[in-house]
Each structure stands twice: as structure tokens, then as C-alpha cells.
Image (spheres, rainbow, N blue to C red):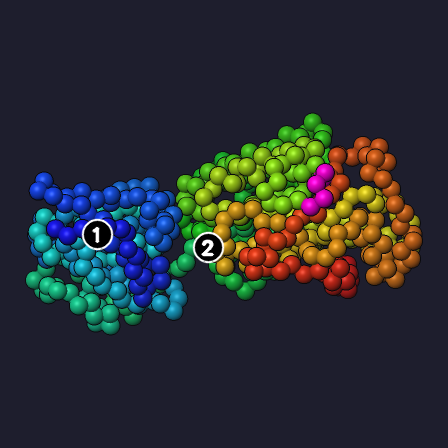
Amino acid sequence: MGEVQQIQTTTTPIPGLLLFSLPVHGDNRGWFKENWHRRKLIDAGMPDFGPVQNNISFNAQRGTTRGIHAEPWDKFISLASGRIFGAWVDLREGPSFGTLFTAELSPHEAVFVPRGVGNAFQTLQSDTVYTYLVNDHWSAEAQANYTFLNLADEDIAVPWPISLDECILSPQDRTHPRLADVEPMPGRRILVLGADGQLGAALRRAYQGQGTVDFLGRGDFDITSEESYQAMDWRKYSTIINSAAFTAVDAAETAEGRVAAWAINASAVTRLARTAVEHSLTLVHISTDYIFDGTAAIHREVEPPSPLGVYGQSKAAGDAAAATVPRHYIVRTSWVVGQGRNFVRTMAALADKEVPARVVDDQWGRLSFADDIAAGIRHLLENNAAPGTYNVTNDGEPQSWAQVAREVYALRGATPTLVAGISTDDYAKQGTAPRPRSSVLDLSKIRAAGFNPPSASERLAEYLGKGT
């Protein structure tokens, strides 16, 4: 028996369907192979799909034929003995629907089959042992979400080596629909939690017209409630975007607020992270400049957290939980402006009345418009960016809060000098939570990922021009 010395990967006409040649080492006693080696297979191009169940199919006779079944999970298929003719048909929604790929498999080969790709095989030897790993647990409920195609479909015309008239088939496989009657398996969906907040509203706009995103507010899904998690069919989703958060910075310093901040920003994120790991989901989590003490002039993604107050501490804990998910995006932002109450709206209302304002002039940062944060999130997901933490704010020269306020006054036709500066120390005397002096986030990494945030000043003029 020949030996394959390293894993070799072959792409196929079906997107995501990968064929592997596995090293098989034989001598006079038989042979040995590493049937599943996570790191080596990932390095060879296979997704880190997180298998949770191992199944074995023993086929006593040559000509046993099974399929074509598209299942709502990914599979890694290999043989322990024997030889098969494999046939795979893309039954997912999209332009590759109906694409066929075939190959013979022995213990030397394996195949990764993505969710929604129909899988079938015909044994070419007796006593064939067919094994497969899957990344979700089988259940009768899950089987109801299978998509089937008839083995003898004339449009696909699988070139079975052994005529189906001479094969061993199940009664069910004989009666599955032809391609014209197959309802394609829909793709997994994106779930946005906290969809009734500023960022949630922006994500609704970012995905407007897309039928593949579900938006749930607190009344629909409470991220602190175990019942919400248990009631959700997570198999429908590929991605969770968590835009829910406790953001009342000053209230977080109170006894009641401290409990709420930790429950929503830390404990609930830990539960979300566990859900993402259990169901092989991508988790997008929103972070904040408040995880830093602000002593660094510019904060990069690798800077260790150093929060000053309860809000920042609870968010830093949530970031640490989110980072345990193999495929995660921690999107760190600052000074968010969107729908609802925010600093810009407050200053605009004062400017319209020509009311003087006292605003902190020794805290520095950049505004982050919610629509641009949402666009950055969509960019990371759609471009399959490397998992990790990304700073996402608007671009431009950093400003103090007082400078932003003066810019708002000017854009509203009010006198900018109505805005007087106040120090952080004087502002803190009003009983407010500690805040970082510098909230400037470095944008090099998100730019390298292909997303260039617009200028904060440009976006501010547009925002105020909409009648804010």
C-alpha cells in the first residue's frame, strides 16, 4: 500500500466542499492514519467547524447506496475500511444550487461537506466502514430540516458505477423528490440582539432589504434570561451580533447600577460566548474606550485593559468572555452617536436656543457614528476578516468634547464661543463616574482589513443636516 506523506487539499466546483488526501502508513501488520487532526486539517484549509458527534456506518455488501441528504450541519467524512463512490450535490440557496461533484474515497481520502450540500455514497467493496464527524447533535427535530434529492434524478444524472437497479437502497431514498421539486436549504442567518438601541437601529439600516438577518430587542430576547437561550433554535444562525449593553456610565457606580452593569455587560456575554462555542457561531461583541484608563495617547487593540469605573470594568470582563469564542469580533468604539439621546443631540438643542454650555475640554477622542460602526461590522463579516479585536471609530483629528460642542454650535448657526471649557476634575465634582482622558483609538488594523472609516467632521455635518 502506497503512502501519502502529507495532507493535500483539493477544491471542488461546490463552494466549501473540500477533498483531502490523508497520510496512511502501512506495513506487514496493516496500516495506520491520523483520521482527524484538527490543527493539521485547519492548516490544510478546512474550517474549524467544531465537531460534537462521531457516527459510523457499516455497509456489509458492495452496491449499498445511501443519500442524497443535505443536513443542517457540516460533516467530515472518511473511511476506516473499503472504498466508496461519493456524490455531492449543492442543495443550498444560491448560484451553485444543483452543482455535482463525484470522487472515489478509500482510507487515503476524506471530504469536508458544508451544511446544505447533499451527500451520497455507493460502496464499491463489501464490509465498508464509513465514518463522519458532525458539528451538531442529531435529533428528530433536526432531521425535519434535511433537504433531499432523489438518487436517480435525471437533471443531476449522477454517474453511479453500479446501476441503481442492482443496488441496495432504502425505501425512503427511492422516493425523494427530483431537483425541480427540491426546496433549497436556506443559509444560516445573522441574529442581532439589543436591536432597539442606537447601534441596533443602525444595523437595521445597514441590513435593510436583506432577508437573512433577525433583529431582537430586549422584549424579544433578554440576554440575562436563561429561558431566552433555551427557547432559541440556534441551528438557524451563523452569527450573533450583540449590541445589547448597560451604558449608563454614572448609574453603574450606584449599588443597583453596579449589579445591572455586571449582569448585562459581563455575565450575559459569558452566556452568549458559551452559546457561540456550543453551536459553532461567530460572535460580534461591542467594546468601549472605557476599558482603558486613558493614560496612553492612542489605544491599540493589544493594550491590556485598565478600566477606571464599574462600567469599564464590566465591559472589560465581557470582552474577555467574548474572546474565548474561536470566531469572534470584538468591535471597540467610543463616543457613539446615533438615534436617541446622545451628546450631539444635546448640544444641538442648546445651540438652537443660543444657550451657553460648559463642556469638558481635557478629554480627547473621536466621534463614532452608529451607521459607520454598523458598516464596519458588516464589512468584517462579509469579508471573512481574521477574528479578533478591531477599533472602529470615525477618522480625523482627535477633539475634546468642548471642541466637538463648538463644532455643533457652528454647524447650527450659533456662536461657538458660547461653549466654555471645563476640566475633568471640575466635572467630576458633580458626582460623575471616572472617565478616560484619552479615548483615541488607533484605526490601523481596521484600515488594513479594507474598511476606511469616514471623517468624524464630515459625518457630523451630515448628521446635523438631517434635522437632528
Q: Main secondary structure of the magenta part?
A: loop
Residue 90: in sight, yes or no? Answer: no
Element assignment for label 2: strand
Q: Residues within 10 Å of mark 1 (few under 14, many from 20)?
A: some
Magenta-colored span: 294-298
Residue at (75% x, 59% y) in the render: 457
Query: Is the residue 36 above or below the residue 212 in the image?
Result: above
| The one of 257 and 460 positioned closer to us in this rendering | 460
Residue 169 locus on image (x, y percent)? 14, 57
Residue 412 image-quadrant placement: bottom right
Indicate the amino acid at tag 1: Val
What's the CA distance linking mark 2 and mark 1? 39 Å
**Mark number displayed over residue 90:** none
Query: Is the residue 190 above or below the residue 208 in the image?
Result: above
**Mark number displayed over residue 4:** 1
Quadrant where the C terminus lies? bottom right
Q: Is residue 19 magenta?
A: no
Q: Residues within 10 Å of mark 2 (few under 14, many from 20)?
A: some
Q: Is 258 positioned to the left or the right of 135 in the image?
A: right
Residue 114 locus on image (x, y percent)? 34, 55
Image depth: mark 2 or mark 1 in front: 1
Marks 2 and 1 close (CB-CB < 8 Å): no
